[in-house]
Amino acid sequence: MALTQNLFTALSQRRRGPDFRQGDKVGFVDIQQTFGFDRLRVGRWVSKEESRAAAPLIFDAFADLAYLLNLPPQAIGLRQSLSLAFGTGGRPGVQAHYHSVSRELALAKHAGAGALAHEFWHAFDHYIGPKAFDVSHHHNALMPFASDCWQKELLAIEHPLNDRLLALFACVFEPQGQTSAFVRQAYALDKQLGSRYYFQPTEIMARAFEAVIEADQRITNGYLVSGTLAGKLFDAGGYPDTEHRQQIQLALTDYFYPLGLALAQQGLN
């Protein structure tokens, strides 16, 4: 418990941003209701003390993410299609995971810090796939991710917001019509490791997304995202360089800002 508490304390001290809670104490039920999650699961081995320490960090992380993306807080739950789990199990060393079958964002009790933005993008990528692309001929029961649809050149559904999403994908993968250095390096990393992970479109987009979130100077939140601006993977080219990241940030804003306005006009608070 002491190690976990020390981690929570360190992370809370690392956060810099608006006080969205206004000093209020929050629990996991508050997180579910505020951010519009479908279901909530907290592991049986999560103590009351751990729950009380973790909930404010997770609340702040989702609030910071909504703020940076200009989304109403309720939109984080993706119209109540996304569920949240904390400390319910998982693989050793895995910080967090998005389960596409159950549409659940799962945070590890001892190692969930820093991975929330990455996994939220996976959830959003999965959610927006059938809304942005024509998947009527998709025979798999599991709906495809939007980034996979883009790579496979599926027909996009005509809508101004979808045009902006396509522009975001193009900015990440093929700025100026050429494969980006970021994508080429992802291929090189997988070739070096003898695997296919970093080069997957879903992973390329998740790393691009979290890199933009961490670089945004309006917020500093080590629970939301960490490790994209320094470290071994950064040194290996696993994230976009500064110039490319700035380009992606503009494309990301061009997409999410009008999306947030549209959701607010629909009354999604």
Image: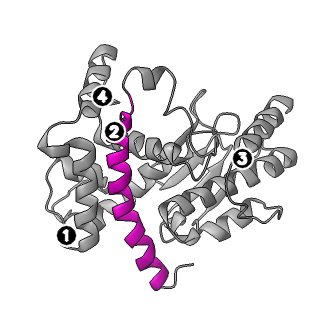
Disc 4 designates what residue?
186
Please identify, in this view, whether the residue under mark 4 or under mark 3 is nearer the observer: 4
Residue located at (49% from left, 80% from top):
264
Residue 126, horizontal then vertical, whole percent: 37, 55
Q: Dot 3: what SS?
A: loop
Among the two numbered marks 4 and 3 on one chain, the one whose residue lies closer to the N terminus: 3
Q: Looking at numbered disc 3 in the image, what kind of residue is underneath it?
A: Gly
Disc 1 designates what residue?
157
Q: Identify whether 6 is placed above or below 62.
A: above
Q: Looking at numbered disc 2 in the image, what kind of residue is underneath it?
A: Glu
Alpha-carbon span between mark 4 and mark 3: 35 Å
Q: Dot 2: what SS?
A: helix
Among the two numbered marks 1 and 3 on one chain, the one whose residue lies closer to the N terminus: 3
Please identify, in this view, whether the residue under mark 1 or under mark 3 is nearer the observer: 1
Task: Name the one closer to the observer, 128 or 235.
Answer: 235
Alpha-carbon span between mark 2 and mark 3: 42 Å
Among the two numbered marks 2 and 4 on one chain, the one whose residue lies closer to the N terminus: 4
Tell me the number on the disc at residue 269. none
Q: Looking at numbered disc 1 in the image, what kind of residue is underneath it?
A: Ile
Please identify, in this view, whether the residue under mark 2 or under mark 4 is nearer the observer: 2
Please identify, in this view, whether the residue under mark 2 or under mark 3 is nearer the observer: 2
Asked if the stretch drawn in magenta spans residue 50, the answer is no
Q: Dot 4: what SS?
A: helix
What is the total number of numbered labels drawn onto the structure image? 4
Disc 2 designates what residue?
243
Q: Quadrant of the N terminus?
A: top right
Point out the stretch of residues depicted in magenta. 238-265
Tell me if 179 is positioned left or right of 195 in this view. left
